[in-house]
Image (cartoon, rainbow, N blue to C red):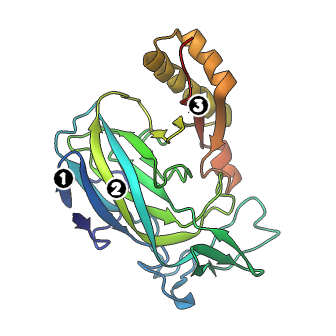
């Protein structure tokens, strides 16, 4: 199995990465090593470098990965097999109540597959990939993926991303050991990780934006300047998808969205400027739909 080292991180060229560091065939399973942005691997409290410090490494992801045969108009199907958290997860955010509860960097030691929190409590590990994208023709919100911090990008699920350049040029990082919808603190339990993924080329869905498939649901992801605009776009994408899958009219697909759909929020709630200047949502619709 091929392994992409965390030494291959993207520096100072976010979304403009064109030189592959790994080439794979469709259907290959690989391990991608990711870093923690406070330092490549946080091993102790001494590694919890605050935002803005010389050691702090903002938004460094691993890649890009070139997938043979992937062409513009295709989608990369990234099935997340496993995420192994490396050493200490942490958080150092702000969020809507930062002035009430100011936060210093906090480490969350892992004990018995749970994150230990201040106050003597713990929560289960629910690792997910916060930042994953294909190199876009022109960055447009999260149409190509990116720092979506959407909790369903996790083991057992498949993320579909549009291809804009030959090979897809896939980049990933910003793994969280645990995080709730909305990422209220602006960070989850941030961590370095070893991510096992199987990557294929998909020509069935052809969604213009990211799509997540879980065992039970399809989730269309969209982001625009307002929450309403994001919901509207995700709904339009889901209507198109359901109409194609089930052979029903778009009007009937809209009713289906109403009866079975749920709106989920990505990592958009850490500051007012993010919520009002681009809010990622996911419209989730159950797959348990049958003909009469």
Of the two numbered discs 2 and 1 on the same chain, state the one appearing first in sequence. Answer: 1
Q: Residue furthest front?
A: 292
Residue carrying label 2: 197
Question: How many C-alpha atoms fall within 10 Å of the one at disc 3: few (<14), some, or many (≥20)?
Answer: many
Residue carrying label 3: 285
The mark closer to the camera, 1 or 3, is 3
- Pinpoint residue 258: horizontal percent, then vertical percent: 68, 22
Label 3 sits on a secondary structure element that is strand
Of the two numbered discs 2 and 3 on the same chain, state the one appearing first in sequence. Answer: 2
Residue 240 seen in this snapshot: yes
The mark closer to the camera, 2 or 1, is 2
Is there a contact, CB below 8 Å, between mark 1 and mark 3?
A: no
Q: Residue shown at 50%/25% (left/top)? A: 237
Q: CA distance from mark 2 to mark 3?
A: 24 Å
- Pinpoint residue 273: horizontal percent, then vertical percent: 66, 50
The N terminus lies in quadrant: bottom left
Question: How many C-alpha atoms fall within 10 Å of the one at disc 1: few (<14), some, or many (≥20)?
Answer: some
Q: Nearer the viewer, residue 121 or 206?
A: 121
Q: CA distance from mark 1 to mark 3?
A: 32 Å
Residue carrying label 1: 24
In the rendered image of this protein, does residue 22 appear above or below residue 266? below
Q: Image check: 59 left or right of 257?
A: left
In the rendered image of this protein, does residue 185 appear above or below residue 257? below
Of the two numbered discs 1 and 3 on the same chain, state the one appearing first in sequence. Answer: 1
Q: Residue shown at 42%/45% (left/top)? A: 158
- Pinpoint residue 108: horizontal percent, then vertical percent: 61, 78
Q: Nearer the viewer, residue 107 or 286?
A: 286
Label 2 sits on a secondary structure element that is strand
Question: How many C-alpha atoms fall within 10 Å of the one at disc 2: few (<14), some, or many (≥20)?
Answer: many
- Pinpoint residue 98: horizontal percent, then vertical percent: 75, 67
Label 1 sits on a secondary structure element that is strand
Write down the quadrant of residue 205 in the picture: top left
């Amino acid at each position: 199995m091929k392994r992409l080292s965390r030494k291959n991180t993207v520096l100072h060229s976010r979304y403009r990465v064109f030189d592959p560091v790994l080439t794979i065939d469709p259907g290959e399973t690989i391990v991608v090593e990711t870093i923690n942005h406070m330092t490549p691997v946080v091993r102790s409290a001494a590694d919890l470098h605050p935002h803005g410090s010389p050691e702090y490494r903002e938004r460094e992801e691993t890649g890009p990965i070139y997938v043979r045969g992937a062409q513009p108009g295709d989608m990369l199907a990234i099935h997340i097999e496993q995420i192994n958290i490396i050493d200490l997860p942490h958080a150092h955010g702000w969020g809507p109540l930062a002035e009430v509860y100011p936060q210093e960097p906090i480490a969350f030691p892992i004990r018995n597959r749970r994150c230990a929190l201040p106050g003597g409590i713990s929560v289960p590990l629910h690792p997910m990939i916060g930042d994953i994208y294909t190199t876009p023709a022109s960055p447009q919100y999260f149409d190509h993926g990116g720092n979506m911090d959407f909790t369903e990008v996790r083991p057992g699920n498949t993320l579909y991303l549009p291809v804009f350049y030959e090979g897809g040029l896939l980049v990933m990082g910003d793994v969280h050991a645990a995080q709730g919808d909305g990422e209220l603190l602006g960070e989850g339990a941030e961590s370095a990780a070893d991510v096992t993924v199987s990557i294929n080329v998909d020509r069935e869905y052809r969604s213009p934006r990211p799509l997540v498939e879980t065992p039970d649901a399809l989730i269309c992801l969209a982001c625009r300047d307002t929450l309403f605009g994001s919901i509207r776009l995700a709904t339009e994408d889901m209507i198109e998808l359901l109409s194609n899958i089930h052979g029903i009219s778009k009007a009937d697909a809209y009713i289906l969205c109403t009866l079975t759909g749920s709106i989920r929020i990505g990592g958009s709630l850490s500051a007012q400027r993010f919520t009002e200047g681009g809010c990622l949502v996911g419209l989730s619709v159950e797959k348990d739909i049958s003909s009469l």
